[in-house]
Image (spheres, rainbow, N blue to C red):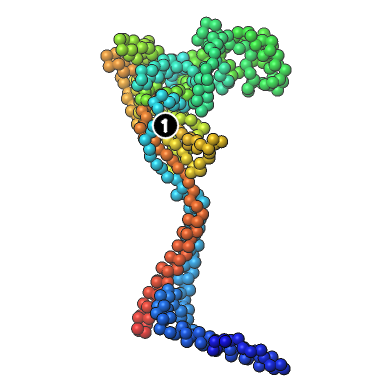
Amino acid sequence: MLPTGSPVEAAPAAGEPAAQQQLRRRRGAREFVESAMEAVEAPAFRRLARADLFPKVKEEFSRQQSPVGAALSAAALGVIVLLLLYELLHYTIAWDAYRTELSVDSASGSVRVPIHFDITFPSIPCHALTIDAIDATGAEENNVAHDLFKSPVNHRGQLMFVGKYNYVERRLGPDGTPVGPREYDPKKDPRSPHFCGNCYIEPTQHHHGWDRKGGPVDEHARKVHGDMCCNTCEKVLQFYDMHRLPRPHPFEIEQCIEEMSHANPGCNVRGTMEFKRVRGNFHFTPGSGTQMGPFGQHIHTFDMGEALRFNVSHVINHFEVGDPTVPRFSKRGVSFPLDGARYTVHRGLGLAKYFLKIVPTAYENGRTVFDADGLAPAPPSAYEYSVQEHHHEMGGIDPFSGQSPGLFFIFDFHPMKVHHVFERPPFTRFLVKACSIIGGVFVVLGLIDRAVEVAMRRFNGLE
């Protein structure tokens, strides 16, 4: 049997009008709703209704709209749009994706670290500039020439050699990693008595259309005259005159560097030096360095007149530690503190020292890519550094103090390692923030609207 008040009724009698059938169905539905409401009014259901978080307003209560409410509604929409745009921009740019972590650096001290630099000395000629390197293990390298490229600089600060370096020994690649052992060839060492300089210069800027790289003159000269020796700038120019070829510019001839060094006041030195991860230094000083004494002290031998002309004024164009190919990032940006540093000696002699604290640094993008063996490679590592400067002008050279003019880079490695991590938050985080913005704005402005309404009613004497 069907319950009382059920909207389901017996089939209508045959021939009953459609209007009466529809009226009967409506009456049955109303009786069913009334019976359901009576059931809800039971004490048990009334106790359950007290837990309703969404109370209903009866239809007989009218809703009122006011200009103040309209203004607050417009303000709410404006605030919501602005905050959502800000959060969208925040998520797109990923301001919160950067974080920094610290760990103890466990790398061995025997690991080699490259230091790349580009320094211009406007008042020291290239032939008077020597570089020595020392570290705390006792390793010492004097008059370093490999992987360093010198170019004379004129009075206007312009490089006088822009050609190709063929006679500089290269032990390191562009990223500072060793290129592997190479067989020594005395014919390519300008300091060797067996040096044999190439007479034909590969065209770079001096070609005249027909004399271009890979052209007939280029191929003929390299094949036929490739074994001839031209060890001086004048020999190279005589070779071109003898074969009735247009002379190349001296700033393209590597054999002309020595002559241009004596004709121009300054020198630009750029290149890479490699060091162990221990305390050490490298420096530019007059004369040549050597080890002497029972303990192998590092000393410099120089001509006094040459030392008195050693003006250590300089400009550091670039100074970087570690592999330059590693993509670097951080929340505050990557900086090279020594880039653009300059020091000018106004009178007398100058002594410039830069104390560097080098910090091992790793860069992680939050995504781990496994290799074929299922192993996760180590994140790319580089180094950041901080620096303190000390400049001192001396009236002369005191042989008892051991101080001489020069430029020193003194470095040490920090025992902690910095990890810069970039990990973009998930999109669900943006959705949660968007929902909180919408709900929070409506709640806050609803409270403001209620407070304004109460204040206006009291002001008008309605309460």
Farthest-out residue, top? 193
Q: Secondary structure at mark 1?
A: loop
Q: Residue placed at 56% from the left, 22% from the top?
A: 162
Q: Is residue 190 above or below residue 365?
A: above
Residue 457 appears in the rendering: yes
Question: For mark 1, what is the residue?
Answer: 338
Q: Is residue 19 left or right of residue 372?
A: right
| Residue 188 locus on image (x, y percent) | 55, 12
Q: Nearer the viewer, residue 171 or 55?
A: 55
Q: Nearer the viewer, residue 263 or 180?
A: 180
Q: Nearer the viewer, residue 166 or 19?
A: 19
Q: Is residue 292 left or right of residue 443?
A: left
- Using the rendered view, name the quadrant where residue 420 is placed: top left
Question: Which quadrant would the N terminus be assigned to in this image?
Answer: bottom right
Farthest-out residue, left? 400
Farthest-out residue, front? 1
Q: Is residue 99 above or below residue 136?
A: below
Residue 387 appears in the rendering: no
Amino acid type at image mark 1: Leu
Q: Is residue 215 above or below residue 54?
A: above
Q: Nearer the viewer, residue 24 or 106?
A: 24
Question: Which quadrant would the C terminus be assigned to in this image?
Answer: bottom left
